[in-house]
Image (cartoon, rainbow, N blue to C red):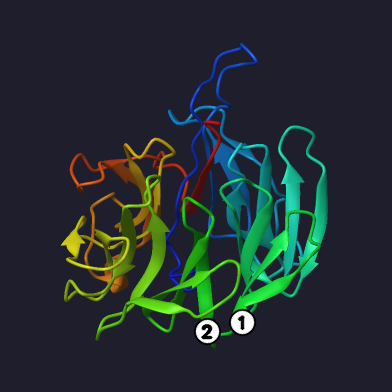
Amino acid sequence: MRSSRLLPVLAAASVILAGCANDSSPAPVIVSFDDGWGQIFVASVDGSDLRQVTPTVADDMSDGRYGNYAALSPDGALLAYTRGGRFIDLVDLESGETKTVYEGGYQPVFSPDGSAIAFSTGGSISIMNTDGSGVRVIAQQESASEATFSPDGARVVFNVGGYIVEAPTAGGESKVLLRDQFWNADPAYSPDGSTLVFSSNRGGNNGSEIYSMPAGGGEITPLTDTYAVHPQFTPDGSRIIYSRATTQSGELVTDSSTSTRVELASMNPDGSDQKRFTPRSITAQSPSIGGGQ
């Protein structure tokens, strides 16, 4: 479920909250996403101002410009993404200037203060400064992926072979937060750090649903009962943006083999008020949210 190449029609979405012209106002909240075919977009929270950030590719993952795993900086000014499966590029969203900051990594994610980026390398989780300097390994784990920072920036949580692990960013011993007979992935913290949301196949379907639990581990609560992944909280914690699979006509599915496209949806943190977020005219996956500072 890492891209539409693995699940041809899974996608996620992008959003921007309108801001005021006053310089003292918080930066607009934006959401980035990829379409599953190599292009990355950003858009407004109401679906307006949708724009493509990366070049159009020839629907071929061998194209060196193929982009996915987009991540927004906390202030919404920068976008990091994986290009060609092995380069981490950084885009200034205002100027459009792009530069490569790392070769040999993927799945970048910004620290809460925007000064660092955590990423996967295939056998570890590493952290570097936003400009690509100061690279260091914080967790040496085969198949480690999907890293995300805790709200205080002191820890990184990630997936290792279907269980969820946490490691201190300063280095030290890793801690398993969730390991059972199910496949657990896509961990993400609530803004206050109290809750961890994730996807899991514990629902008994041929696919995954979204669940929540206390950040340190504990009782697991289902949030969706249809095929859904990639949960991300909005900065104020009021909504969760996520990817969900549907049929071509828009019906929600529980079985991955019956899905034909993916869309971005949103819901309350308790799983209520689930609704489509992106228009039916596009596919979208792996949301990242920035801005609001």
Residue that badge 2 annotates: 143
Q: Quadrant of the C terminus?
A: top right
Q: Is residue 96 left or right of residue 259?
A: right
* Element type at mark 2: loop
Q: Residue at x 81, y 62 (%)?
A: 133
Q: Residue at x 45, y 56 (%)?
A: 11
Q: Is residue 65 left or right of residue 234?
A: right
- Residue placed most toward the observer, 25 or 161: 25
Q: Residue furthest top?
A: 22
Would you place residue 47 above or below residue 121 in this image?
above
Question: Amino acid type of disc 2?
Answer: Ser
Residue 221: give x, y in percent of width and height.
17, 60
Mark positioned earlier in the residue sequence (2 or 1): 1
- Residue placed most toward the observer, 231 or 187: 187
Q: Are marks 2 and 1 in contact (CB under 8 Å)?
A: yes
In the rendered structure, find residue 122 and report the number of the disc placed on it. Answer: 1
